[in-house]
Image (spheres, grey):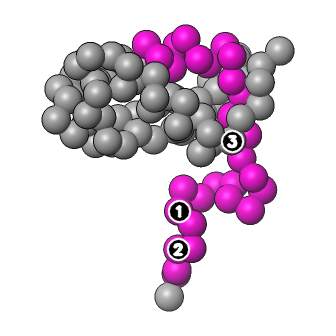
Amino acid sequence: MKTPITRAELNAKVLEAIREHPACRDVAEIAITSVEVLGQGSTWHVNVVDSGFSPLEISMTVARDVAERMQPIYELIDAPAHHGSNEQGSSNA
């Protein structure tokens, strides 16, 4: 059984794990995206948004490896108020 985790908590754990790699200590920002995989159900992916001074290609590879290790452990949950939105307090005016 997977452990339920919020996007913010998962983001922090994944970013910490990515930064453990010597070439990725400067990764500044990642994004966690929930996805539906045909035949497998819900899961999540990691994208490197800002690699800082870390090489982008290595950062992306490490992020994918971290996600593959953590996906079987954590189930992404979102608070209902934020479902379908990646921005808080956005204005449509």
Q: Is residue 80 above or below residue 64?
A: below
For image coordinates 35% across by 35% down, the residue present is 48
Distance from label 1 to label 3 (Cα)?
Answer: 15 Å
Res. 75 image quadrant: top right
Residue hosting label 1? 87
- Within-10-Å neighbours for mark 3: few <14, some 14–19, many 20+: few
Distance from label 2 to label 3 (Cα)?
Answer: 20 Å
Nearest to N terminus: mark 2 or mark 3: 3
Which element is circle 1 on? loop
Residue type at mark 1 is Glu
Which element is circle 2 on? loop
Q: Position of residue 66 (x, y in %)?
A: 47, 17
Residue type at mark 2 is Ser
Q: Nearer the viewer, residue 53 or 69?
A: 53
Residue hosting label 2? 90
Q: Position of residue 82 (x, y in %)?
A: 68, 59
- Count the labels in the image: 3
- Disc 1 + disc 2, Cβ < 8 Å: yes
Magenta range: 65-92
